Image: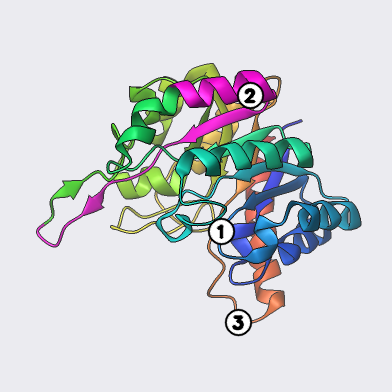
Amino acid sequence: MIPVGLSTASVWPLRARSGFELAAALGFDGVEVMVWADPESQDVAALRRHSASTGMPVLAVHSPCLLITQRVWSPDPVVRLRRSVEAAVELEAPTVVVHPPFRWQRRYGEAFAGLVAELEASSGVRIAVENMFPVRTPRGREVSAFRPSVDPTDVGHAHYTLDLSHTATAGMDALALAKRMGERLTHVHMGDGTGVAKDEHLLPGRGTQPCAELLEGLGEHGFGDRGGQVVLEVNTRSARTEEQRAKMLSEALLFTRLHLG
């Protein structure tokens, strides 16, 4: 069976604890921890307590590599990635999700592929490099902030994360990208988007991405046998009440499980 987890980013602005509690209440298989400004997300001991109290295993740790998290744990991206792997080991999470380096992180970018391979070999944790998207200027020009590109298959890594909100924003063919990733695809961020110039993270089925087709294909091509995971990373900020947020996440979970079969 392919596990379906809930990203703690999906309950923002609530704290990580709420992500664990909602995941347990709604019947998810586990949690992906987004490490960011929320102090709970940075506290491995607190995360371990939340996991134990809710019965929700940590499926993945998302390394702090957003623009707003450039000083979480350390201003050095190498230290942040190492800390992420250490946290995953402590939490018994099999996967770390990381973005490609930013263009201005020249030294980190040059060492990135080797660092990822080294940390995977020494820890046994899969480091799944995620596809990203370019920034569109007011004049319609696309500029990539990532080195060497928004597509991690341009470099080649042992493990990949495929994010469908990012493929929408980038105007990429999600199914073609999944095919290029092949058996190295081990982690999916399930969400959706309409192709506008922002990262929407809509509920699956509410945008233009081939969410159902991708999920059905995972079940047919041994994704689960390789230890693959699907994590819902969606935007619920429009929810005015906890009941509304729970309803949105329940809908997304039902969609995902239905198409995984």
- Asked whether the viewer can see residue 212, the reply is no
- Name the mark on residue 223: 2
Residue at horizontal 29 percent and vertical 34 percent from the top: 149
Tell me whether circle 1 and circle 3 mark residues in contact (CB < 8 Å): no
Circle 1 or circle 2, nearest the eye: 1
Residue at horizontal 74 percent and vertical 35 percent from the top: 89
Helix, strand or loop for disc 1 = loop
Disc 1 versus disc 3: distance between alpha carbons? 23 Å
Chain-order first, disc 3 or disc 2: 2
How does the figure colour the protein chain or chains? Answer: rainbow
- Name the mark on residue 36: 1
- Name the mark on residue 240: 3
Picture coordinates of residue 238, whole percent (x, y): 53, 75
Q: Amino acid at mark 1?
A: Trp
Does residue 171 belong to the magenta stretch? no
Q: Which residues are magenta?
A: 114-139
Picture coordinates of residue 59, whole percent (x, y): 72, 40
- Above/below status of 119 relative to 11: above
Bin the neighbour count of mark 2 within 10 Å (Cα to Cα): few under 14, some 14-19, many 20 and up.
Answer: many
Chain-order first, disc 1 or disc 3: 1
How many numbered markers are drawn?
3
Q: Amino acid at mark 2?
A: Phe
